[in-house]
Amino acid sequence: MLGPHDFYRIDTGETEDKRGHTLHPRRELKEGVRMSGCECTISVPSLSEIVTAIQAQNGKIIMEETVIVGIGRLIFFEDTEGNLAGSMQYDENAG
């Protein structure tokens, strides 16, 4: 299990990073905006560089950086076309 009680990680076989996939129920990443597709979270080497790039391209941070203890740091953002996505910098020492 990863995150709240209704988030589940699924091992789909051997992968280079061995992180598998996480599934959870639909939720609103942005208040009043129902997610109708998959919730995409992208693994990145530097979350601070991603935040800078999002803001430079007029995107919006909709969830400020949060730490998931033992997993990493996470943000959610909205691009200029209204698409919502997340970025995660994995760090087993996050705390």
Image: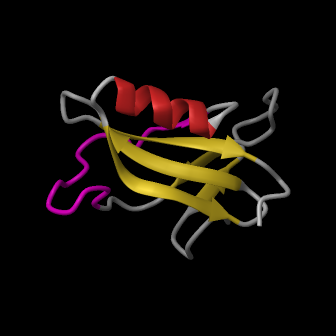
Q: Could you tell me residue 37's position as x and y percent?
A: 29, 40
Q: In percent of the image, x 85 and y 57: which residue is there? A: 93
Q: Main secondary structure of the magenta part?
A: loop
Q: Nearer the viewer, residue 11 or 50?
A: 50
Report the label total. 0
Furthest residue in direction right, as rendered: 93
Horizontal relation, residue 66 to residue 39: left or right? right
Q: Nearer the viewer, residue 15 or 70?
A: 70
Q: Could you tell me residue 89's position as x and y percent?
A: 67, 42
Horizontal relation, residue 11 to residue 30: left or right? right
Q: In percent of the image, x 66 and y 33: which residue is there? A: 46
Tell me, yes or no, if residue 27 can be seen here: yes
Per the image, is 51 magenta?
Answer: no
Magenta-colored span: 28-43
Where residue 3 sits, quadrant-wise, is bottom right
Quarter of the image with the N terminus is bottom right
Quarter of the image with the C terminus is bottom right
Per the image, is 40 magenta?
Answer: yes
31 shown above or below 62 = below
